[in-house]
Image (tube, rainbow, N blue to C red):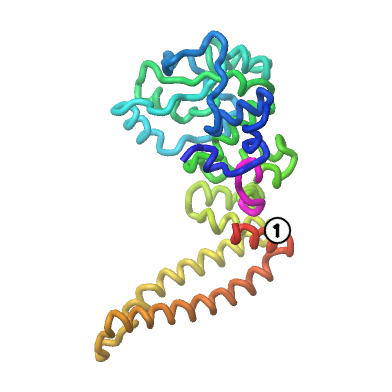
Amino acid sequence: MSKADSLGGSATFDAVAQPMSSRAASFAAFAGQAPAPSVAGHSSPHTPRVPIGHLAPNPYNPRVTYAAIEEMADSLASKGIIQPLTVVTCEAFLAAYPDHAEDLTGAEFVVVDGNRRLAGAKLAGLDDVPIHVDDALAQDADTLLETALTAAVQHEDLAPLDEAKALERLVQVHGSQRAVARALGKSSGWVTQRLALLKLTPELKQALESKTLPVKVARTVGQLPEQQQQSAAEEALAQRAKQKSESPRKAESAYPVSTPAPTAEKAQERSVNSSNEMATADLGVLAADLKRRLTPQQLEELAELLLS
C-alpha cells in the first residue's frame, strides 16, 4: 500500500491531477502519487549511496527516543537498508533554517524521513546508506517541518507522547485539528485523543512512558480535568485487573462437571447469545459512564471516531 493510500484523500493529495506548485508536487511525491522532482546536481538513474558521516539528523525530528534501536541495528547489519533515507541538501535546509549552521558542520545532507534508520545504521557500523534527495521538501520552513512531522506520525512505532507532540506542531502548521485530520486522512476524534496525552499530569505521563499506564486509558484520562485524572486512571486500571481475574473463573464455570458437554452447534449458539447479552449490558454501563465523564463535544468526537 502506498503512502497515499494510507493517508487517504485530502485536498493536498487530491490535487495531484491538476497543475501544482512545487510544494504541492513535493507532497504528492512524498505520498507516493507522483515521481519526485529531480534535484539539480543530485539526480541519478539509480539510488545514490553516501557515507554516513555526510548525513546529519533533522534538528526538528519529533522522535525523542528510538524504540528497539538495537534490534534495528542487528537487522541492518545483516540485511542492510532497503528503503532509502529521504534527505535535503544542507544548503536547502539552511535556507529555511539559517540558525542551524553549527548543527550541520561537516554534513552535506539533512535527513527528513529516516532518522531512526540513520541511528540504527550508525549503531550497526555501516559505512554508507542509500538516499533520496529532494530539496523541494525544504522550499520553506513550514514545508520541511510538515513533511518531517507527517512522516513521523505515519510510523507505527512512534512513542505515544512523541506522536502527540508531533501532532501538536502539525496543528501549529495547519492552523486547526480538523485541518491536520484531513491532511493525515484521519478523523478529528483520532487527533483529539492523541493530543489529550499532552494534558496528562507529569506523574501519568511518566506512567505512560514506563508502560504501566495503557495508552488507551491514558487517552481517555487525558481528556479529563487534571484533578480527576489520577482517580480515573486508578479506577480504569482496577477495572481492567478485575476483568482479567474474572475471565479464568468464567471459563471454568461455563460448563459444570455434571452437565454433559453441549454439541458444537448448541455451544456456539449459547456463546453468541451470552456474548450479546453481556455486550448489551456492558454498553449500557459504558454509555452512562461516558456521559458522566465526557463533555458533549467530546462525546460527539468519540461518535465520529467510532463511525470512521
- In which quadrant will I find the C terminus? bottom right
As drawn, which residue projects farthest toward the bottom?
258
Q: Is residue 246 above or below residue 181?
A: below
Q: Amino acid at mark 1?
A: Pro
Q: Nearer the viewer, residue 48 or 210?
A: 48
Q: What residue is rendered at 51% in x and 69% in y?
A: 239
Q: Tell me: 157 left or right of 102.
A: left
Q: Is residue 9 above or below residue 85?
A: below
Question: How dense is the environment of label 1, judged by Cα within 10 Å: few (below 14), some, or many (20 and up)?
Answer: few
Q: Quadrant of residue 64?
A: top right
Q: Nearer the viewer, residue 117 or 276?
A: 276
Q: Is residue 186 magenta?
A: yes
Q: What residue is rendered at 70% in x and 62% in y?
A: 300
Q: Is residue 160 above or below residue 127?
A: below
Disc 1 target residue = 225
Give the magenta-colored segment's residue range: 182-190
Q: Give the secondary structure at mark 1.
A: loop
Q: Tell me: 47 left or right of 134.
A: left
Q: Nearer the viewer, residue 133 or 51?
A: 133
The majority secondary structure of the magenta stretch comes to: helix
User: Residue 180: x percent and y percent?
Assistant: 67, 42
User: Residue 269: x percent and y percent?
Assistant: 37, 81
